[in-house]
Image (spheres, rainbow, N blue to C red):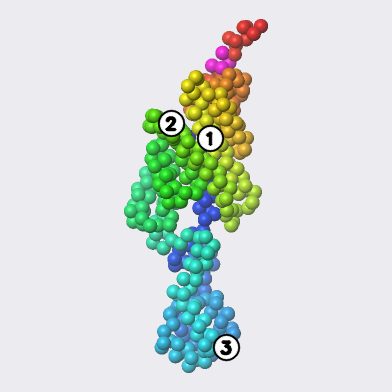
Amino acid sequence: MNIKSAVFLVLSLVLSAKGFAQVATAPTMGTTPAPAPMTEKEVITELKKDGADQFLKDLDRRGVDFEMDDETEKRLHKAKASDEVIKAVRAAGPKERAAAQNAAALASGAIIIPPAENTDFKAIQTELDPDKIISLAGAYAQKYPQSQVLTYVYAYEAHAYQQKNDAAKVVEYAEKSLALKKDNVDMLMTAGNVIPMPQYIQLHQGEEEQLLNKAEGYCQEATQALDQLKKPPNMDDAKFAQQKTTALASIHASLGLIHYDRASQGLMGWDKDELAKAEKEFQQAVTLATPEPSDYYRLGEVYVREDKIDEAIAAFGKASQLGQGVVKQYADKEIETLKQQKAQMAPAKQ
């Protein structure tokens, strides 16, 4: 199975663009630690020493490490704290500050992840072994069935199965992810890319038309979701535009395969209209971004079915030039076969 690099790119792009926040945040490595919250003793000392104005500035920056109760309020009043100061200290307590941070995060569209759950999610994100990802993701889904990031956990599981060349499981987990978040562009692209592949189509004989329609729908929805994807805050405009274009090229390649599959099902031989659509989509795929060798190979296959021998040789040549392994081997074989056909046809034209 051809693993489209753009699909993996989009998963990281989606996660970079989407804000994630823990319920209780903590300093991370490489960042300047936030100043420690003020104790009650520090509050009273600073009020007496520096006055309310300076104290309120420090309070806003640091907060306090205690919750306000009646006894604490009495002690602060004894230290000459005004009602305004009491109100500010109450709002600066751990629970109030955490609630305010979470409200701000939610308002910005971020997803709130409890600390323990976030640790398990990070373990999935950083794991490289596909079998371990599948195991971790399965455990996560059982442990946190209501998690706000479960759609992304299923996405990692789908990609793990993609590395194992298990087309059926890729689609299964892509659709599980989409059931939780229908505009998950990464999974829309994945489903649209894998469903029309022979490895998947051959598992569902008699359902080809229905499956190809579904795959085309996923591709169309992916294009719309990609267009609405927000730029990650730390990414420059040019790189963001480049990555979106790479993803769009992948979608065109998927559409090309969908139309090629439809063309093969023509009642009177290959459907010329569907071949023309496949040609157009594959041409988009290889010109919008850095081309995949497999897309040039499939474009060559389309040209062969359209009896465009020179164009087919050129496309297979590009596949051979850019590819390696099986893609290069098959492309070179196609070029040799087509050149022999062309040589046999030449005398008849004279």
**Mark positioned earlier in the residue sequence (2 or 3):** 3
Location of residue 272 (image quadrant): top right
Range shown magenta: 337-341
C-alpha distance separating marks 2 and 3: 77 Å
C-alpha distance separating marks 1 and 2: 15 Å
Mark seen at residue 208: 2
Identify which residue is drawn at 46% across, 77% down: 93
Secondary element at tag 1: helix
**Mark positioned earlier in the residue sequence (3 or 1):** 3
Mark 3: give few (<14), some (14-19) or many (20+) Cα within 10 Å.
few
Q: As displayed, is residue 3 above or below residue 115?
A: above
Query: Could you tell me if residue 104 is visible in this image?
Result: yes
Identify which residue is drawn at 43% across, 80% down: 67
Residue 14 at x, y percent in the picture: 52, 51
Mark seen at residue 255: 1
Residue linked to disc 3:
51
Magenta span contains residue 339: yes
